Amino acid sequence: QKEVEQNSGPLSVPEGAIASLNCTYSDRGSQSFFWYRQYSGKSPELIMFIYSNGDKEDGRFTAQLNKASQYVSLLIRDSQPSDSATYLCAVNTGGFKTIFGAGTRLFVKA
Amino acid sequence: EPEVTQTPSHQVTQMGQEVILRCVPISNHLYFYWYRQILGQKVEFLVSFYNNEISEKSEIFDDQFSVERPDGSNFTLKIRSTKLEDSAMYFCASSESTRGANVLTFGAGSRLTVL
């Protein structure tokens, strides 16, 4: 059974701080890794994806991938109250199916 | 910005009735998907569709479910004889390619309530 595991949270950080979200996956054949953000009652929207080991930065967001440890993380710098949402880690093994974790709820306090 | 459009936004039905959820994927996307999310739970893959046929399906996608692309734009999910446990948000998604990163663009979802 291929799994994607995340801490459900909530993770609470003050405005302006760095939020760190983590994810582990079970299938070593996984090829691409995604972070989606989901506001309550809304659909997931892509923040960024990564498929090579190391870091990938996009504005305030940095995704980190360590395939040896089967670990993906997302750092959000200068967190804003508008970043308060559930962050979904998702993994694709190269086929048509993307598997989602249950998400980590992030709360940014103003 | 191109978007995936889903209708209806909310449907209430009686147990045992048939439901059709509709989606218009992004026009230049070739791969189409249905996911569902039961309230408070994770987003679950149901089915993918490419070149007018199912390319992959999950164990959830049993004989009760079917998908169709009846014309050049619509992509539908039919649920026959709905059960209480089918109550969920159903998301349609599309992607340009599965090569490299298979980036999914989701529609706003159709909330199905089975009474």
Image (cartoon, rainbow, N blue to C red):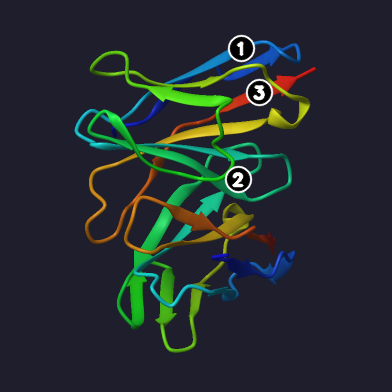
For the N terminus of chain A, give its image quadrant. Answer: bottom right
Identify the amino acid type marked 3.
Leu
Viewer-side label of 1, 2: 1
Q: Which mark is residue B70?
A: none
Return the chain for callout 2.
Answer: A
In the rendered image, the residue lying farthest to the right is B115
- Quarter of image, res B92: top left
Up-down relation of residue B12 to residue A65 (above or below): above
Identify the amino acid type marked 1.
Glu
| Residue wearing tag 1 | B18
Q: Which mark is residue A39?
A: 2
Residue nearest the viewer, comparing B81 with A84:
B81
Residue B62 vs residue B16: left or right?
Answer: left
Residue nearest the viewer, comparing B7 with A68:
A68
Q: CA distance from mark 1 to mark 2?
A: 30 Å
| Residue wearing tag 3 | B112
Q: Position of residue A103 (x, y in %)?
A: 63, 59
State the residue at coordinates (19%, 33%): B28
- Circle 2 — which element? loop
Identify the amino acid type marked 2.
Tyr
Residue A30 vs residue B97: left or right?
Answer: right
